[in-house]
Amino acid sequence: MDNRIKELVNSIKQVNTYKDINIMEVCGTHTMAISKSGLRQLLPANINLISGPGCPVCVTSIKDIDCMLEIINKHNVCVFTFGDMLRVPGSNSSLYTEKSKGKNIRICYSPTDALEFAKNNPEKNVIFVAIGFETTIPLIAVTVKRAYEENINNFYIYNTHKLIPPALDLLLSDKKVKIDGLLCPGHVSVIIGSKPYEFIPKKYNVPCVISGFEPVDILTSVKMILKQVRENHSEVQIQYSRAVREEGNPIAVSQIYDVFEKTTSEWRGLGCMPESGLRLKSEYLKFDAAKNFPVGKVHSKEHPGCECGDILKGIKRPYECKLFSKACTPGSPVGPCMVSSEGTCAAYYKYEKFNLNRKTKISGKKGG
Amino acid sequence: MCLAIPAKINKIDRNTAEVESFGVTKKVDISLTPEAKVGDYVIVHAGFAIQLMDKKDALITQGYWKDYLNGQ
């Protein structure tokens, strides 16, 4: 084992309080890093690292996926998407299934790839599946603004953007969820900075540490949370100071709110939350795929056995789902947490399937 | 999905910079980091630089990535 890791694990033992502590990460990249590096097994048994709604693919509502699939079936469009979205199942199909049937669905690296394609193919209607948290939203805002400035009339976005702080507020207010500390997402925080989390220590007395993605970063952040718990004190701290500034990237934030405004959004597992999503402002509505390519009423239904909702809230672990690694595997996923490369179920399946000797259930709400 | 890696800027042409990371060069949009100059390190996410990074910090992060890519 790396000496830095050994030293950190030892120093964590020194600040450990030996009462059950649930630390939630809210970033798919943290989820994968924790599973891949085996950090759960290195930490003292009273420290539970649990995953929250940190993967944008996983929290996209099934209704949004069904609507997107309806647009593809009803209208002659060319769809660009990040690869993560391709296999996420809707009620009856997925982008991947539709692609295999010959629909024009392409994977791209950047939203600007979709805009360039639209410019070069003015006869095609190009839709970019605009998914993501605050890390990705400014990029899409810049792309939409560029389409506006260059008067591009065949570029659209299907908008499913989500904002992290309102989701944390809802989670922490849920009596079924017990969270003693939050590992806040590193790259979301590059954009928004540390201030948008400050309501959490004030309202819920829960320590927050904005963490980097390496095992050393995550262990250091866990130690910072434990110190706060031990001192019965809570505040927002930045561990990932290599990239995160207190003020974030104000230019990127202003790009978001030039193009979008806050609205109610439906999250898989968490339900509808006010002010937790974004919609295009009126001057940019001509780029809205949902408005320009209407579909009838969509009737969505999730698989009745899928526990993704409770897994996204940190109430259950993947192995508490009856479908996990039986009916639901990465090759044949039932729920989004298994399909996304950064989903909690995919992380457990890939790295922790055979190492579940700490099959602990997540303990109940603090003080009750 | 919020993956981002540090890269060094080698050339700038208006809003586009040519960046290099692990020997790979790529064009990225720098309109979210307008103060970026040739020689600076930036964090790149989905074709955009989203923040500047000190050289020392960028090299530390790239070192972690090298360990990861070498399976350590």
Image (cartoon, coloured by chain):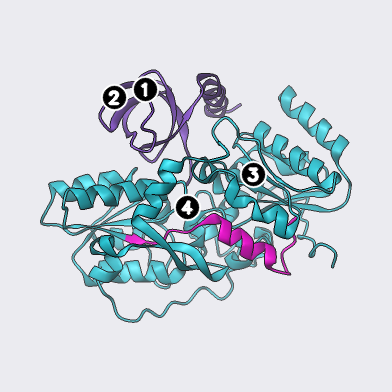
User: Looking at the picture, how far across and down is residue B67, in whole percent?
Assistant: 57, 25
Contact flag, marks 2 and 3 (Cβ < 8 Å): no
Residues marked 3 and 4, same chain: yes
Give me the disc on residue A35.
3
Q: Which chain carries label 1?
A: B
Pick whichever of labels 3 and 4 is earlier in the sequence: 3
The magenta span reads: A158-179
In the rendering, what colour is chain B? purple
Quote the CA–CA distance across marks 3 and 4.
Answer: 22 Å
Disc number lying in front (1 or 4): 1
**The residue tagged with tag 3: helix, strand or loop?**
helix
Q: Mark 2 lies on which chain?
A: B
Say if the magenta span includes residue B63: no
Contact flag, marks 2 and 4 (Cβ < 8 Å): no
**The residue tagged with tag 1: helix, strand or loop?**
loop
Quote the CA–CA distance across marks 1 and 4.
Answer: 27 Å
Quote the CA–CA distance across marks 1 and 3.
Answer: 37 Å
> Is the residue B20 above or below the residue A34 in the image?
above
A240 relative position to A248: left or right: right
Quote the CA–CA distance across marks 2 and 4.
Answer: 28 Å
Determine the residue positioned at 27% across, 70% down. A291
| Chain in cyan on the image | A
Q: Which amino acid does label 4 sit on?
A: Phe
Residues marked 1 and 4, same chain: no
Say which residue label 2 marks.
B12
Q: What residue type is labelled 3?
A: Ser
User: Looking at the picture, how far across and down is residue A348, in whole percent?
Assistant: 63, 51
